[in-house]
Structure formats: C-alpha cells, structure tokens
Image (cartoon, rainbow, N blue to C red):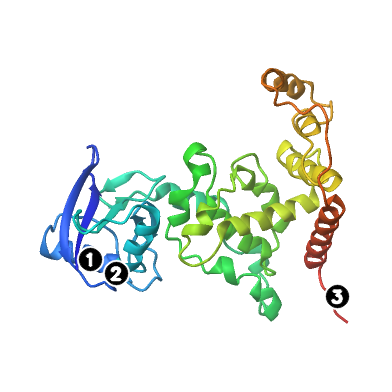
Amino acid sequence: MQVLFRIIRQEPGSTPRLQEYQLEVEPGETILNCLNRIKWEQDGSLAFRKNCRNTICGSCAMRINGRSALACKENVKSELDRASQIFNPPTASEALPTITIAPMGNMPVVRDLVVEMQSFWDNLQAVEPYVSTAARAIPEREFLQTPEERSQLDQSGNCILCGACYSECNAREVNPDFVGPHALAKAYRMVADSRDDRAEDRLENYNQGTQGVWGCTRCYYCNSVCPMEVAPLDQIGKIKGEILQRKDSQASRSIRHRKVLIDLVKQGGWVDERKFGVQVVGNSFRDLRGLVSLGPLGLRMLARGKFPLTFEPSEGTTEVRSLIESVQNLNHQSASPSETP
C-alpha cells in the first residue's frame, strides 16, 4: 500500500518545514522501518534516533500523528486506524493515507526528529533516583527483599526513559520548574524501595511548591502515551498520598486544597464552592491576603449570577462518604508496616 509520510524537519537555527515522502509499505511495517527506508532509499539527510528496535531502549520516541510514541513499536496499520478514528478517513478520490511525524515536545530540536534531552536528564537527576549511599553501606549482609516489597517497584521500574510522557506534559510546558512525570515516577520507586533510608527527606523534597508533585495538572497525557504502562500519574498520586498522610492542612495551600476538597465532598457529596475558596485560599480566614485575592473573582461571579447563595447536598451523600472513608481506611492499612511474628 502507498502511504504519504509528512515529516517535520528543522535545521539548526532555522524554522520548521514540512517535507513529504511517498512509500510503498506493508500494513505491519513499523514506523521506524519506514523511516529507515526513507533515509536509505530517498533522503540520507533525514535525522532521527534509533537503537534497539525492540521497545527496550526508548531512543526512537517521536510524535506520530500528534502523540508521542516509540517508532519501533507502532506500525503503519495501527497508526492509520487510529488516525481514521480521530480524523475523517480519506475517500477513494482523496489523497493517500497519511502519517505525520514530528519531534517530541518540551525539548529544543537539534535537527529534524532529534531533540536535546538535557532538561529531561537534569530533572531526573534532581529527584536522586538511586538508593541512598548510607542505606547501601552494610557490608555484612545482602539487601534481601520479600516478594511483596519487590512487587512495589515493578510498575515504576519498567520505565525506559524514552521521554514520551515528558514530551506531552502540559505542566512542564507552562511551568519550567516542574521536574516532569518521568522523574516523579522514578521518585516513587525510591519512596517505595525498602532498601532506601531517605523516604522522609525525599517526600519533603517532592512536596516543594510546583516543582514536585503539586505541579502536576493531572491531565493524564503521561499515562496515555507511556509505552511501558508505567502510569506516571498514578505514581505521582502515590507520592501525594504519602505526603498527605504526614502533613496537616496548614502545611501548604496545595495540601490544604486536597484535604478541603475531600472533606467538603464527604460533607455534601460535592464541593460547596462558597466554602472552598475561603478555606483553601483564605485558609479559613487565617490568610487575609488570600481572602483579598478572592475579591475580584467573587465579584465577577456575583455579577454573572454564578455564585451559589445556597448549598444543597447531593443525593447519595451517605454512600459517597462511606466510599471515601473505605478508601482512606484501605490506604492507611496498606501504608502501615506489616507485623511479623
């Protein structure tokens, strides 16, 4: 079958340009093999990264039809099927089936599909993703883990550092201080590792402002594009859970936001907007500057009839409260160390 490949190309110091290549391909042929053939048969100047070709090294991550993926994992048929679900499929009289390939986001382009990943590695280093030196300094015995302890590391340990989640991270795009989902997924691995002795220090570090877990906007893009099902957002949520267990609502606005949200939903089944801003931003009248900052927004809401003057609990509030408390109890039990005889 004939397929048109549209590739975003860019030379150092120049603006991006679109270049098209037509190729006769097999439906099961990988995108990486198609790129290889374009380079070998049509244009030797095309630049992209590759290595293992087996979904192990993560080198060939790029944006394929608008989302970051591994070129060695995705094939022509799957990409065309996916595109037909998102866009209107071409009719017989229209142009050839098309696959658009672009460099990853949130990183500067070096050339064509090759990006500079220094910020990616710097942010990974910032979370210190390795077992602490002090914890390793026990020469008289091995670090033995139970199967249960080791299983806590399985999902986050599958990360191959391809950069797909980092590329699609909305929080990283608007906040250059945010370390990124890849770093925080690795960070949780250290928190959960029974061999590490710095969990408390790590959690304090990951709790800082919007650089750590509170900078995540929970858009789920990182989960949707991860080729190894690491689910970075889930790992970020686990770190938040560990922090929330250790902190009260006065620790920071981010923590207060989460705790007040849960408390209000438990009370009424959904959020009472009259109380939410006052309790979170105004810290229940403790933060006068925060209260004043709510003034313009409150006035606009009143003027447009969007400020609720009354609050009616939702139906099934009792069931909602029971569900939340059950989840909280389960989380507490799973976080408590098991007793051994």
Q: Quadrant of the C terminus?
A: bottom right
Q: Position of residue 214 (x, y in %)?
A: 64, 44
| Residue found at x 52% / y 49% | 180
Q: Position of residue 206 (x, y in %)?
A: 64, 49
Q: Which residue is mark 2?
A: 30
Question: What separation in Å lies between label 1 and label 2 (alpha carbons)?
Answer: 6 Å
- The amino acid sitting under disc 1 is Cys
Q: Quadrant of the N terminus?
A: bottom left
Question: What separation in Å lies between label 1 and label 3 (alpha carbons)?
Answer: 56 Å
Question: What separation in Å lies between label 3 and label 2 (alpha carbons)?
Answer: 50 Å
- The amino acid sitting under disc 3 is Glu
Q: Which residue is mark 3?
A: 339
Q: Which mark is residue 81?
A: none
Marked residue nearer the N-terminal end (3 or 2): 2
> Is 93 left, or right, of 312 in this rendering?
left
Q: Is residue 125 visible?
A: no
Q: Nearer the viewer, mark 3 or mark 2?
A: 2
| Residue found at x 69% / y 23% | 301
Instruction: Give the quadrant of residue 133.
Output: bottom right
